[in-house]
Every structure is written in structure tokens, then in C-alpha cells.
Amino acid sequence: MNDIWSGLQAAFWLLITLDRDLIEITLRSLQVSLSALVIASAIALPLGTWLAIRRFRFRRAAIAALNALMGLPPVVVGLIVYLLLSRSGPFGVLGLLFTPTAMIIAQVIIITPLIASITHQAMRELWAEYHDLLISLNTSNWQRIKTLIFDGRRALLTASLAGFGRAIGEVGAIMIVGGNIDNATRVLTTAIALETGKGDFALALGLGFVLIALALVVNFAIHVLSRTERDGRW
Amino acid sequence: MIRVFAFLALIWGSTATAEVMKMAVTTSFHNSGLSDVLLPAIARDTGLEVQLLIVGTGQALRLGEAGDVDAILVHSKAAEEAFVAGGYGTHRREIMYNDFVFIGPSTDDAAIAGQGSSTEVLTAIARAEAAFVSRGDDSGTHKKERALWSDAGFDTDTLGDWYKAVGAGMGASLNTASSLNAYILADRASWLNFGNKGDLTLLFAGDPVLFNQYAYLPVNPERHPHVDSDGATTLEDWLTSDAAKELINGYAINGEKLFTFNAVQSD
Amino acid sequence: MVDVMRATLHDAVVTRRGKAILGPVSYQLPSEGCTIVIGPNGAGKTTLLKTLHGVERLSQGRVDWGIPDEIARQQQAYVFQSPIMLRRSVRQNLIFPLSLSGVSKAEAAERVTYWAGKIGLAKMLDRPAPRLSGGEKQKLALARALIRDPAVLFLDEPCANLDGRSTREIESLLLDVQKSGTRVIMTTHDLGQAKRLATDMLFLLNGRINDHGPADAFFAAPASPEARAFLNGDIVE
């Protein structure tokens, strides 16, 4: 109890004094996770929609693979990305290991299956609902995808937010590929791990509260930005 | 959508431009807090931004072997010599030392305080079968601990349940020891900086075998042409300079001196 | 135009999981008026409508509208048994088919105003369509089907589950539509509705056309015993 109380106090002080390290770490967390989110969404949203409306031979296998990938342990993703990006690995020449880019790559791999899978679920329902109408209206494939993505935007937003939540709270993979370098690749989660390692629970907990607050703020911000609440709920 | 991109552009905006090199260091070195004193001084004196990868000795050596860092600063002499012999590093330069200490519950059930040597300490713990936490992560500290057990005539693989290898860093292991009220071997710096001491206290120190020599090893540019060997040389020159000597010898926590500078200075 | 849009079924068969649910059917529909398809549940009424509309995959035979299928389908509209509402406003639902065929915004706005008035939803244009009542949804679906001025209008049980007032409103709309020359082909369970609207009748049984003919003659004296039994309210298998 005492630890939690002092954690709250630490978080409070970090916030009101606008601690420079805290702001830097927080911005880097956002930078990495939002970049990963944009890239992963650009891949996963069309992919999930496409899987929902197209019938092809390996569709079931593709969906099963997607759902299996959703459960990938981040640490394993981190290890594999690490080995690929290491100077002695196949992509070593790029010199990406221990950079924010490496962390983005790992997070994209972790959250793309998640976003695609949720998208697929939501789009499958919507497609079942719209199927007859869109066929009857003689729509092209592109018009169908456009209509589904537009009318399913709330579900897609939810899918993206789920991906963001997983990305911003992830520690195992980015610790391995980012290296938790101060001023370069340290983000909120790896900083929390570090402070816990030092036995400085108050600071760790303070960072944790900042992380939670950040997740809430970003969720809220995305909702406001896309004005979904004003459109009313169906 | 445009707003999202604008926001992304905003947070991507700031990028560092100073010359950057990467060095793998051990957890114990970082936990000591000395790096927080040295890094700003290095940046001020040489213009070099040293990025630290804080890992165990085992992984630090692997990072050097793979060429993922430009230099390493570790404390495990045998492994370091093998690293240089394998052609992964150009040479090994001793910088400073600190010491290991035995930590345990204040009740000291195994009565290790006041023993004459680390061998006697370990024998007392083993006889009492008192809970003992081992790093178990192939780090420098772990290697040291195993060597001490071996000197005392024990094989860590055959010890009973009271010997707990946690496979974690120094801080996490200290957290475990704190919650189990167990004995543990730690470096003095990590111990002094550790915030969650609980009922633990420093029980034994001072045996010369507990001295912990840190050495600096630049990664061999012949093996990995991309490494920043100029940066590594600049850093080595600085680490062995009088400025470094003053900062290292002067570094103290709660009034206790932690490190002793012992590099052989060229001039 | 009326002559062009005359449907002929040539040995059309639809099978699902190895079972024929329609056909073989060979039949030429009249070129104008309102054809009403009746028959017991599972007789294949919906399948026949979808086959004529060209959205059902035939396992055999073909449907011929006298013009290429694509062009034919563009001049047709289909109202489904349970109205499919896009998750948008009433206005956006009405605009949707127009935007697909590239009608200008001004023109679209004009047509939306016209049709919204006609179905009594003028004041609800900005309401989310999925939150309308059942009758309002069905009227919206009908207006959305008619907004492109189709030559042929298919309706699958348009008044199932609706109260008397909504049914009356929809029927009066359908009579208007018929008067303007639009070909109407619909299914219904409501024999009274069939009598009120039909110019000719199709009686389906077990996937085949069991009886057919001009509405007056059909209701006065059905040719087949099954059709007679059905009109009497008996259960027909």
C-alpha cells in the first residue's frame, strides 16, 4: 500500500514538474507506438477487410494463421527481429538494431495480426449484413471495400486502438531490439522495467501511472479526432 | 487522418546530431549510478554521445562478437581474455575495480558476519542450508559467484532447494532476495543504490578475492568494419585520463567510495 | 423500353448442397404490370426473384432479359425481405445508389427531397437509418430502390411484419410505381395483397411453376388442384 501511495506521489511530481526525462521518454513511446500503429493499420485494415469479402482457396488457413499469429509471444518476436537485425544477421548492414526503427518493426509484427483479426471479425459481420444489397446494386469490388471501411469505421477504430494498447504496453520485444538506451531507445515500459530492477518502485509506479494515463488520453484523443461519438451510435 | 500524420511528424521532429557510439555495459556498472556522472563529462570533453546497452556480461560479450556495439565494459576476466583471443576485440584495458559483498537477513541465521574469508562464508551458508539467491544469468556477477562456490569446494548444480538461481539482473535478484529474506552476492554499487532493502543488510566484505575488475574492450574493426573504432579510441583515451580518474575515485554513495581507478595511464 | 425488359427463363435450375431448390423452370414473364409470386414456404419464391435479378448462381439454364445482364441489372432494383439499412443517415442511404452511378450532387439532393417527402421521412433525413421503425425502414428501402428510376422493381415480402397502416402506405406507393410504367415483380404471403396489386400470378410449388395466369382468371378459377387448395388456405406440400 505504501509503495502504491509513494508511486502516486512520484507520478504526480513527475507530471506537475514536467520532468524533462519523463517528457522525452513519453514522446518516444508515442513516436514508436503511433508509427507502428499507422504502419500496422495500413497493412491490417485492408487485409482484414479483404479476407472478409473474398472467397479463395486458402482463406480458412489464412484466417487460422492470422489468429495464431495474434498469440505470438512478444519476447519471441523481439528475439527473432534482434537476430535478423544484428550486424551478424541477414539485415545487419542496415544498422537498425538498437534504434527506434527496430522497435517499430517489432511492434508492427506484434500488432498487425491483432488488428487484422479484429478487422476481419467486424467486417465479416458487416459484410453479411450488406452482402445482398451491395451485390444487388451491382457494385465493384472497390466500391464494396470503400463502403465497408466507411460504415465499419467505428469497429476499425476499435481494432486500431486494441493494437495501440498492445504496442504501448509492450516491453519484452522492444527491450531486446531497442536495448533501452537512455536518450535513444528508452520508452515508458522499458524505463519501468529498469526502475523496478533498481528497486525504485516509486518511480517505476509513477511511470506506470503515466503510461496508463497516456493510454487513456490517446484513446480519448483518437475518438475525438475522428468524431465518432458525435455521429451517434447505431 | 491528416491530423494523425501531422501529429506523427511533430513527434518525429527531434533527432540528435552528435557523434554517437554504442557501448555494452553490465547491469552492475549502470546500477551504480557512475554512468550518470561519466556520460555527461564524456559528452562535454570529447563531443561523443555514448549510448549504453545495459545487459549481463554474457550478452555484452555476444553483442561485441556480433558487432552490434562498438565497445564493451565488463568484469569477467577469463571471458574477456577469450573475447580478445577469439579476435573479437582489439585488446583489454583495465579501468577500475569495485568489490562484491555478501548481503543477507539482519538476523544472519547462517552467521556469516565475522567469518574470515568468502570460502568460510559460503561454507557457513551451505551448512545452514539458508536460502541463497543466485543471479543465474551467466553475468559477470554470476560467474564470480560460481567461482567462489567452486573455490569453497561446492558444485552449484548439486546444491539443494535453498540455492535459488533466478535468472535475472542484479536489481531483480535483489528484489527476490529481499522478499525471501535470503543471502545474495551483490556488487557494492548495486547494493548501495538499491531502494528496496527490506530486512537485508551488508554482512561480509573485504576479502581480496571479492575485488571486481572492470575492463574496457573495443570491438575489432578488422572483424566488423562498420564499428566506430575512432569513437572507441576516443572513449578509451578519456576513460584512462586524469579527468576520469578524478570522477571515478571521487564517486560515492552515502559517503562510501565505490570504485578505485587503476588504469595504467600512458603518460 | 418495356419490350426490352422482358424476362425469359430457360431451364433455370438452382441447387444448394446437391438439392434443387428451384427448377427446372422455363417461363416467359409478361412484359408489363405487376407479377406476384405466391406459394408455400420453401417453394423457391425468393430464389426465383434473385434468379431473375441475376444475383443467384444458376447451376443450369439461363435468364434472358433481351439485353446484356449487366445493363439489365442496372435498370433493376431489389427490396429485400428484411430491409438492409446502411449504417448511415436516412439521407445517406438514399444518396448511396445515386453516388454509385455518378449522379451529380445537385440532382441527387433534389431526388432525395422528392423521395423523402413521398415516403413521409422528410423530417427524419438526418436520423440514423438503423434506428427507424420497421415500417419506416421498409419505406426507406423502397425509396432507395426507386430513386434510380428502375425499369424493373423486385420486392421480396415487402410487408411482412408490418402493421396495417404501413402496409397501406407501401401498397399505394407500389400502385403509383406501376402506373408510371415500372415493371413490378414481388412475392407475398398475403393473398389479399396479391388480389389488390397483381395483374398476373405465379404459383410456385417445390421449386417449380405449378400454375400461372392473369390475376383475375387465376383467383376466379385456378387451373391446378394445388393452387386451388392453397387459395383455400389448405396446407400444400
Image (cartoon, coloured by chain):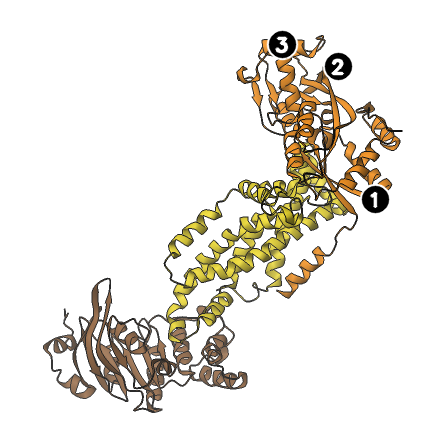
Q: Earlier in the sequence, mark 1 or mark 2?
A: 1
Q: Residues within 10 Å of mark 2 (few under 14, many from 20)?
A: few
Relative to C221, is A150 on the left or the right?
right
The answer to whether B146 is drawn above or below residue C145 in the figure is above
Residue B208: image tag: 2
The residue singled out by tag 3 in the image is: B123
Which mark is in front, 1 or 3? Answer: 1
Tell me which residue sits at (34%, 73%) in the image.
C80
Display colour for chain A: yellow
Relative to B36, is B154 on the left or the right?
left
**Residue C119 point in image, percent of width and height:** 42, 81
- Going by the numbered disc 1, the residue's amino acid type is Gly
Tell me which residue sits at (64%, 48%) in the image.
A93
Give SS at disc 3: helix
Q: Nearer the viewer, residue B140 or C221?
A: B140
Q: Which chain is orange?
A: B
